[in-house]
Image (cartoon, grey):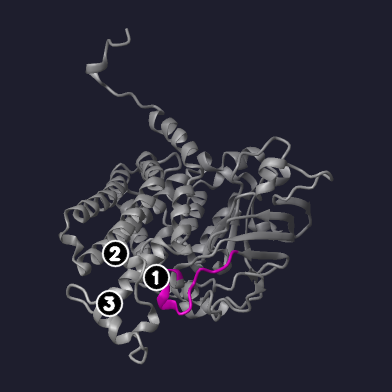
Amino acid sequence: MATSTAPPNGIRTGESYLGGLADGRRVHLAGRLVADLAQDPATEGMAHFLANLLDAHHPDGGLTGADGHPLAYSLAGSGDQVRERGRAFARTARLSGGLMGRSPDFVATVLTAWAGAADHFGPYAENVRAYWRLARASNLVLTHAISDPPADRHLGPGPDGEVQSLRAVRTTEDGVVVRGAKMLATLSPFADDLVIYPFRPLGETETDQALCFAVPVASPGLTLYSRPSYASVPAGDGPFASRFDELDAVCHFDDVLVPWDRVFIHGDVAAANNLRPGTDMTSYAWHQSAVRAWVKAETVFELAARCAKVSGRDRQPVVRQQLGELAGIVETLRGLVVSAETSARPNDFGHHVCDSVPLAAAGMLNARLYPRAVELLQAIASSGLVMHPVASDEDPGAPSHAFMHTYFAGSGVDGITHGRLLRAAADLTMNRFGTRQALYERLFLGPPEAFQGKFYDLFTAGRRVDSPVLDGLDS
C-alpha cells in the first residue's frame, strides 16, 4: 500500500509537492506512461500552478485560518466564518481565473462536511475524522472519482456476471480489496489521494459497490488513463490551457488494497445512498463551486472588456450591450453567492452552512450562463480570433514581428499585448480547452434538465409564499 507523499506535519511546500509527483504513480497520457508530471511538457504547467497554490497557503494569504489550517477544511461556527471560507474560495479561484473546475478546495469541502457529520458513517466514523485531520494538516491535493463506466449505466453485467464498476471483491485483515473502474476523475493525475464514493443510487443487491474510501494515487494496482493534454507548445499559444488543464482520467483499480483506516463505507447501501442528505455535503461543495462560477464569469467579462477596449469596439453600441449582458451574468452569480452566505444557518450537525437554494440556483443557471458568456466573448473579440498573432511573432527575429507588432497595435497597447489578449480569448472560445470548459460547466451538476427538476423540488420544499393577489383564484 502506497502512502501519500505529503508530509503530515502541515509544512507543505510547492517544492515538496512537485518532488512527490515522481512517486511511481501510473498515469497514461495519450498512450504513453508519464514518468514525472512535474517535468513533462504536457503536464508541467498544471503541476507548477498547484505548487504555487500550495505556497499561497501562508499566514497572510487569506487561504488559512487563525489555526494555520486551510479555510477550505474549516467547520464554521458562525455566519461570519462561512463568509470567511467563501472569501478563501474566491481567492483560490482568482489564481486560476476560475478555470480549474476541480481545484483541491472542492473535495476538501466534501471531506469537511463528512467530518462534521461523521456519525453517518457508523463504525467508520473515526476513520473519517482522522482522515480529515490528516488532509487538513498536510493540505492534501485531493480529487474524487465517482462516475461509473458508461457501459454499466446501460448494459449492466456481462454474460459472466462481471461488472466494470468499482466494487469490493474480498476483505483481508489489512483492508478491502477493490476492482473495477471509476471515470471522469478530473485532476486525478496531479492529486495526492483519490476520494471514492457512489454517484448514482445503488440497488439493495449492490452491496459490493457500496463503497466510500480514500487511497493515494500511487497505490499499487491503480492506473489512470488520461485524455490527451490540451497544453500547447509553445505555451504562449494556449496561455490558459498550458497552465490550467487539469486532465480527466479513467481510474482502473486492479485489486487495489484499501487499508481499513481509509475505509468510510463498506457494504452499507443505505449509508451510500444517503451520503449527501446524511452529511449535508452539497451545501459545502456547492458553496465552493458557486464562488468559482462567479469568479470564472468575472474572468470572461474582464477578458472581453479588454479585447473590446484595445480594438476600439467598446465604443460600438452593440458591443456595449454585449458587455452589459456579460456584466449581468457576473452580477447574477455573485448575488446568488451573497444571498446564500447571508442566509447561512446552523445545519442539523451544529455547523453553519450556506442556504443551499441560492447555491443550487447558481449551479443550475451557470450551466447556461457560462456557455452564453463564451458566446459573447467570441462575438466581442470577433475576427481577431480568426487571425491573431502567435507566440513566435513576439520574437524580434521572426519575419512577421515588425508587421504584427504594428498591424495589431490597439488603443493604448502594442501588437504584442493585443495578440496575447486574442490568444487568451481564442483559448476559451475556439480551442479544445475552451470547448471542454463549456461542456464541463453544462454538465457539472449532471444532465441540466434533470437538475432543473431537482431544483424545483428543492425550491418548493417547505416553501409557502404569502400572495394575497392569488388567494381565492383556485377556490
57 relative to 451, above or below: below
Amino acid found under the numbered disc labelled 2: Leu
Foreground: disc 1 or disc 2: 2
Q: Pointer 1: what residue?
A: 57
Q: Is residue 64 visible?
A: no
The structure residue drawn at horizontal position 78% and vertical position 51%, both measured from the top left corner, is 169
Q: Is residue 204 left or right of residue 466?
A: right
Q: How crowded is the residue under tag 2: few (<14 C-alpha within 10 Å), some, or many (20+)?
A: some
Place of residue 110 in the rendered image (x, y in percent of width and height, measured from the top left): 49, 52
The answer to which of 305 and 140 lies nearer the viewer is 305
Q: Which mark is residue 417?
A: 3
The answer to which of 259 and 294 lies nearer the viewer is 294
Q: CA distance from mark 2 to mark 3?
A: 12 Å
453 relative to 254, above or below: above
117 relative to 44, above or below: above
Q: Pointer 2: what residue?
A: 303
Q: How crowded is the residue under tag 3: few (<14 C-alpha within 10 Å), some, or many (20+)?
A: some
Q: Quadrant of residue 272?
A: top right
Q: Earlier in the sequence, mark 2 or mark 3?
A: 2
Place of residue 324 in the rendered image (x, y in percent of width and height, measured from the top left): 21, 51
Place of residue 401 in the rendered image (x, y in percent of width and height, measured from the top left): 32, 86
Q: Which residues are magenta?
A: 227-241
Amino acid found under the numbered disc labelled 3: Thr
Foreground: disc 1 or disc 3: 3
The answer to whether the residue labelled 1 contacts the one labelled 2, judged by CB atoms less than 8 Å apart, is no
Quadrant of the drawing holding the N terminus? bottom right
Secondary structure found at label 2: helix
